[in-house]
Image (cartoon, rainbow, N blue to C red):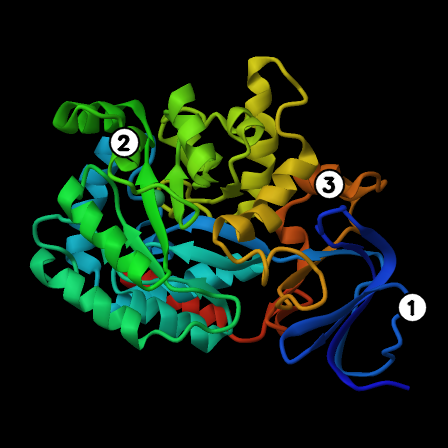
Amino acid sequence: MSERMDLLVHGGEVLTMDASGTVVREGSVAVRDGVIVAVGADLPYETAAETVDATGCLVLPGLINTHTHLAMTMFRGRADDVDLQEFLARVIPAEAELLAPGNVAAAVRLAIAESVRAGVTSALDMYWFHEAAEQAARDAGWRLHAGPTFMDVPGPPDGRAYAERLGWARRSLEAYTPAPGTRPVVFAHSAYTLDPGQLVDIFALAREFGALIHIHASENAGEVAMVSERYGKRPVELLESLGLLGPDVLLAHAVDLTPDEIAALARTGTSTAHCPVSNLKLGCGISPVPALLDAGVTVGLGTDGAVSSNTLDLMGAIRQAALVHKAGGDPTAVNAEQAVRMATVEGARALGLADQLGSLEPGKRADLIVLDTGRPHLTPRHDPYAMLAYAAQSSDVRDTVVDGRVLMRDRVLLTLDEAAVRADLEALA
Ligand SMILES: [Zn+2]
C-alpha cells in the first residue's frame, strides 16, 4: 500500500524509551528523511529503500554522550592513576604541543569510529578547534554538539588570545545554522579557569543566541577548595550567585555538592552530566545522583575524554551508573532502567533536545542502534533494561543509525575507513 520509506528496521524488540516505557516485541521503526515516521508491530510499510533485519535483536535509541572531549583520544594513556590536578598538569603541555586542526580532526574521526561501534550516536564535545571536529563529524554523518570553548590559560592551543575570544565566539554563533537534532552550544571550561566576570560575559553571549551552556563544576574537593578560596563560594554557589544556573545550563560531573546546591540545581532547572568512570578513575568521588534524581534534576550520562576514562564506551558508563550508587548499601539506588534512561532520553533532555532525540517516537530524529542479543552472556533474555545495564557490552552493538543513515552495518563502519583512521592516530601519537 503506502508510501515508500527510506529505512525500515524490522523484527526486533523495540525499546522506545518513551514516557510510558513502551516496549514493542517484534516491532519495526520506519524512517523517512532522517525522521522516525512510525514505531510499532505490523506497520503498513513493507518496502523501503534500505532495510535492517533486527530479528532476535534489541532496537533502542542511540546513546547520547553528554560530556566528552573527543579529540583527547590522541592522548589516551598519557595520564593514568593520577588525580585531577596532576592529570591537568600532564595533559595541558601535551595539548600545547600537538593541538592543530588537522590533528583534532584525526582524533575526532577515531573518537567517532569508537563511538559508532559503541552505539553512541551523538556527543556534547567541549574542545579546542571545534570547527575541525564539526567537519569530521559531518563527513562521517555523525551527530556532534559542539561550539566555541572558553578557557583562560596562558598560551591557548589555538593561539587565540582570551581578549579575542568573545568576538570569535559571536562570529561562530552568527554563522551557525543548527542542523536538525542539534542546537548552538557554548562551552565555558570551569570556574577555576575563568573568573566571574568572564563567566558572566560568556553566559550572556550564549543566552543571546539561545545556546546550551556547558561547564565543568564541582568535579572534586580540590576544585571546590580552589574556587571557595578565591571567591568565598563553592562552584555551584558561585554560579547561582551570578545568575548562571538555569534550564540552558548543563554541568559536567557535579560530584561535590551540598544539599543546598542540589536544591539550587532543581529550583533553576539546571542539568548535570554524570561521568562515573572518569570520576572513579581520577578519585574525584561519586556524584550524588540518587539525591539529584529525587530532587528532580535531569541527569545525563557522559564518558568524559579518553584520558580520564580511557574509552568512549557509554555502555560501560551505564553499568557503572547502575552499580556505583549501590555501594552505600542500597541496591535500589539508580536502577537499570534509570541508568539506561540517563544514556538516552534523559541525556537528550539535558541537552534541551528531548523533542528531537533520545527516544524512538514518530517525529524524532532517527538515531538508533541494534544490539545483537544472540550471545551467551545475554542468554536467556529477561528484562531488557537489566540486560543493557548489567550484561551487555558495547561490542554487542551490531548496527548504528544516525539521522536515518546506517553508519555501521553488521559491525562494519560505512562512513569511515577504520584502518586509515587508526593509522592516522598511531602516526600522531
Ligand atoms: Zn571534562
Gap in angstroms between the C-alphas marked 1 and 3: 24 Å
Q: Are marks 2 and 3 in contact (CB under 8 Å)?
A: no
Percent across and percent down for residue 275 are 45, 38
Percent across and percent down for residue 422 are 42, 64
Does residue 98 appear anywhere in the picture? Answer: yes
Q: Is residue 319 left or right of residue 201?
A: right
Identify which amino acid the numbered label 3 is placed on.
Answer: Tyr
Mark 1 crowd level (few <14, some 14–19, many ≥20, 10 Å Cα): few
- The numbered mark, 1 or 3, whose residue comes first in the sequence reads 1
Residue 58 in which image quadrant: bottom right
Ligand 1 location (quadrant): top left
Gap in angstroms between the C-alphas marked 1 and 2: 52 Å
Percent across and percent down for residue 352 are 49, 54
**Which residue in the structure is indicated by mark 2?**
235
Mark 3 crowd level (few <14, some 14–19, many ≥20, 10 Å Cα): some
171 to 208, vertically: above or below? below
Q: Give me the residue at 56% from left, 26% from top.
A: 290
259 to 110, vertically: above or below? above
410 to 46, vertically: above or below? above
Q: Check the picture and name the quadrant holding the C terminus.
A: bottom left
Please identify, in this view, whether the residue under mark 1 or under mark 2 is nearer the observer. 2
- The numbered mark, 1 or 2, whose residue comes first in the sequence reads 1
**Which residue in the structure is indicated by mark 3?**
385
Name the secondary structure under disc 3: helix
Please identify, in this view, whether the residue under mark 2 or under mark 3 is nearer the observer. 2
**Which residue in the structure is indicated by mark 1?**
42
Q: Give me the residue at 57% from left, 27% from top.
A: 294
How many numbered callouts? 3
Identify which amino acid the numbered label 1 is placed on.
Answer: Asp
Q: Give me the residue at 79% from left, 86% from top.
A: 4
Q: Check the picture and name the quadrant holding the N terminus.
A: bottom right
Identify which amino acid the numbered label 2 is placed on.
Answer: Pro
